[in-house]
Amino acid sequence: MKNEFILNDKKFRAFCIYRLLFGISYSIMIPIIPLFFKSIGMETVTIGMVISLYGVSKTIMQIPFGIVCDKIGDKLTLKLALLLMGLVPIGYILSNTSLQAGSLYVIQGAILGMAAPATYSVLARTLNVKRRGECTGLASAVFTLGGGIGAAIASFILTKLNNFSMAFNISSLGIFFTLIYVIIRVNKVKPMKDKDNKKESIKEILYEIRRRKFVYKIIILSSSAFLGDYIYSCVVALIHFYGQDVLHVSTSYTSSIISVYLLVFGLGAPIAGWVSDKIGNKKQLLYSFFTMNFTLLGLIITRNVTIFTIIIILYFLGATYLNASVQSCLSEFGSYPKIKGFVFGVVGASESLGYAVGPLVSSYIYEYNKNYLFLGLLMVSIFITAIYVVLFNKSGI
């Protein structure tokens, strides 16, 4: 039925619960990692470089694992990634040096890169294609809502108990619980059987993309995904230091900014998905870019904490609507079995590349002049907006 509650579908509900559980568990460790690195003696630029390498490793893994996912099945790929990810927080507890902790963070990025194409694949086969925007919006919402809960737990443990090990232990237990849930509740589908070798398969995939005129659409989705994670990674990596050095606020405030981002994203994503179904992804992408650019301009100018908070929340809303449109467009490729894994891998890799480049570039900008942080982000956002304006009529979005 048209107005049936979308979570009534058992398969899609199972996917959303998996995303909620993983969002909570994973986000307990993510916001505290820059502070953990600082506590063991890492410099700000080094932290930016390590976070960039995390993005590089995540990028490198996504395209090949998009293809692997099509070969062995998305559920098996997801289970392997969750098993490995559950061991990562334990590794931080055992790390004694900056080199060990930094290397582990790079490995963590690679594991997340393994999981991303499988996650997109499971979503694409469980959503209601007639309500694509609502489904992708809700799927994003539950993950980021979980992320907000996880970040709030991490903030409490760190500010009240000052205990990194406790946060890492809880994160690990949560990820292993998520793995058990996926094993029991997420349905398995038979992987594609492809007699061609790897080289022929890639050639066939590229031919199919050109034949269906998806090239410009993939460029727009990839560049938009790049932008989202470029800015998000900079906020995660540097907001604590920017808050202390420029805004003169406490770690508690900057930790809450990350939680607010995830909560805004979580609460706003279903609405953004519904809006994308109503007005179309073409308009929504344009409005999102407009909002993001103007709010970034406001963040460059203001030093008032109250105004900064209001503007950054508006930026978070713009980013939420951008992501909803990207996810909605991306899910359409689930109808094309020959290319879906590759496309999910490419867009996911672009997202991860943003996560890789963002902290590296921004940490150097920050070291040069702390007041230029958001100016650097605005320049990148304007560039990606220009790509969209030039290509959207050719993209078929």
Image: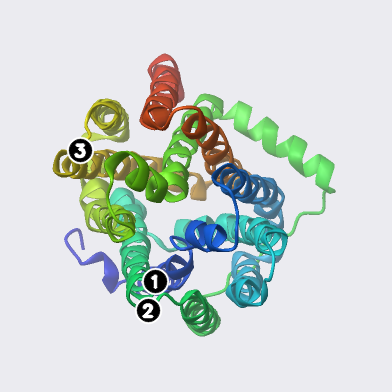
Residue at (56% x, 44% y) in the render? 48
Closer to the chain start, of discs 1 and 3, is 1
Residue 154 found in image quarter: bottom left
Which of the two marks, 3 or 2, is nearer to us in this view? 2
* Tag 3 residue: 311
Residue toward you, 19 or 30: 30
Q: Which numbered dot is residue 123?
A: none
Q: Residue 393: give x, y in percent of width and height.
A: 39, 18
State whether residue 392 is above or below residue 45. above
Q: Residue 195: give x, y in percent of width and height.
A: 82, 54
> Type of residue at label 3?
Ile
Q: Residue 292: give x, y in percent of width and height.
A: 29, 32
Residue at (27% x, 50% y) in the render? 249
Few, some or many C-alpha atoms within 10 Å of disc 1 (few <14, some 14-19, many ≥20)? many
Look at the numbered discs 1 and 3 and tell me whether their residues touch, using CB distance below 8 Å. Answer: no
Residue toward you, 4 or 355: 355
* Tag 2 residue: 161
State whether residue 88 is above or below residue 256. below
Marks 3/2: CA distance? 31 Å
Look at the numbered discs 1 and 2 and tell me whether their residues touch, using CB distance below 8 Å. Answer: yes
> Type of residue at label 1?
Leu
